[in-house]
Amino acid sequence: MTYDNTLKYLVEQYPEDFIRYLLASEATDIQILKTELNQEPIRADSVTFLQTANQILHLEFQTLPASTPPLPLRMLDYWVRLYRQYNCDIEQIVIFLKPTSSEAVFVDQFTARNTTHRYRIIRIWEQEPEPLLLSPGLLPLATLARTDSPQRLLQQVAVQVSMIEEEATKQSISVCTQLLAGLVFEPELIRQFLRREDMRESAIYQEILEEGLQEGRQRGIEQEIEQGRQSELRLVIRLLTRRLGSINSQLQSRLQELSLAQLEDLGEVLLDFVSEADLMNWLNTI
């Protein structure tokens, strides 16, 4: 969670740096889109809209290759929803952060019968660090780049961080660098080159942690709501089966889509049903 929120902060604060690095273009009029897409639930890690180019840059950062649902299907789902909503060119890039030999980090498309969807993938540990060292917003990612001497690379990044003139920016980038470097470096080595005090003093660090806690709490609430919905669904199906006999698969699929409030309403009226037609009529009214 901390890594996700660190990268979200970097992309939102330094979108020009990411656009310059990933698209090799300059953009000055950039709008950060909300990461919640229509037809919940779905959330993208970072969606950046290049208004001047009529293009969306959709970034997904993955610490681990495992994903549920599988990442290729998620990328297709994101593309369809984004295209439906904005009807413009969409550039999708998945950036894998932590070295792994998993075959999943080489998959760059979703394929099914009559459907193929492609996107770009970047394994950050294979990228040269020099382009990442040129921009403040990319310095934290530079710690994860290709190198024959990890300690020397970390030192290079620390030097670049120390050269940032604006103190608040320097502190924020230092915090983000330490957090991402933790993916591949031991804490003791990080402390040799970057000030640990920045972590304690930085408001950004507290914001990143608090956002992670809030998301964790929200996901906990959502899980409780879903558990309650599933319990209500099982109860309603038992009552309907007792009242009407077996429920056909089409109606069961319709029931699966009902919200908790709708299931509660159904639980109050189903005792008046005498046939599946009554259930179908009720479903068609909501």
Image (tube, rainbow, N blue to C red):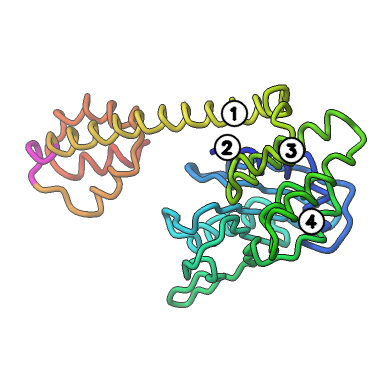
Looking at the rendering, the stretch of residues picked out in magenta corresponds to 240-245
Which residue is at the far bottom?
114
Q: Residues within 10 Å of mark 1 (few under 14, many from 20)?
A: some
188 or 77, which is in the foreground?
188
Is residue 7 depicted above or below 128 in this figure? above
| Residue carrying label 4 | 132
Helix, strand or loop for disc 3? loop
Helix, strand or loop for disc 2? helix
Query: Which label sits on residue 194?
Result: 3
In this view, the mark in front (1 or 3): 3
- Mark 3–mark 4 Cα distance, whole angstroms, equals 18 Å
Query: Which label sits on residue 209?
Result: 1
In this view, the mark in front (2 or 3): 3
**Tags 2 and 1 in contact by the CB under 8 Å rule?**
yes
| Residue carrying label 2 | 2
Which is the main secondary structure of the residues drawn in magenta? helix
